[in-house]
Amino acid sequence: MEPEEIFKKAWAILVEHAGAVQHEYERDSFVRAFLETKHPATEWRFSGYLGFGGKFWRNDGRYYVSCYPEDRNKKRDATIEKVNKLLAELSFYHPRGR
């Protein structure tokens, strides 16, 4: 899977399972940020079902989502678990090879 496809798929997962905004501009901004070679993104606040602290991370060789600890509850924990499982199926890509 090409890098652009990886992040489009990641955004689709965030939209479908974590309530990220389903808007082409948001998706394209997300994809560009993670493909950037000079200053590649490592995190993206998408909020959605995880509240204001809902973030997508590219860190330590994997993708995952999290939220503020004080915002955690059973429903959000279940969302995080499901989304992280789906994101784990994607190939890891970092423009600098990390």
Image (tube, helix red, strand yellow):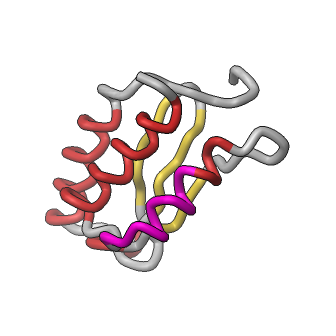
* Quadrant in which the N terminus appears: top left
Q: Of residues 71 and 55, which is closer to you in this image?
A: 55
Secondary structure mainly formed by the magenta segment = helix
The x and y percentages for residue 18 are: 26, 62
Judged left or right of residue 68, residue 87 is left
Q: Residue drawn 52% across and 48% down?
A: 57
Above/below status of 23 relative to 18: below
| Picture quadrant of residue 7 | top left
Location of residue 53 in the rendering, given as x and y in whole percent from the top left corner: 47, 72
Residue 29 part of the magenta-drawn span = yes
**The residue positioned farthest toward the right in the image shown:** 38
Residue ID at (61%, 52%): 32
**Is residue 24 shown in magenta?**
yes
Q: How many marks?
A: 0
Residue 1 falls left or right of residue 78: right
Span of residues in magenta:
22-31
Q: Is residue 50 visible?
A: no
Q: Which quarter of the rendered picture does the C terminus lie within?
A: top right
> Is 19 placed above or below 86 here?
below
Query: Is 95 placed above or below 47 here?
Result: above
Q: Quadrant of residue 40?
A: top right
Residue 59: tell me if it is visible.
Answer: yes
User: Residue 26's x, y, as percent?
Assistant: 47, 68
User: Which residue occupies 30% across, 70% down?
Assistant: 22
> Residue 9, image x and y in percent?
34, 42
Comparing 68 with 46, the one in front is 46
Which residue shows up at 17% across the image and 54% down it? 78
Q: Is residue 38 left or right of residue 55?
A: right
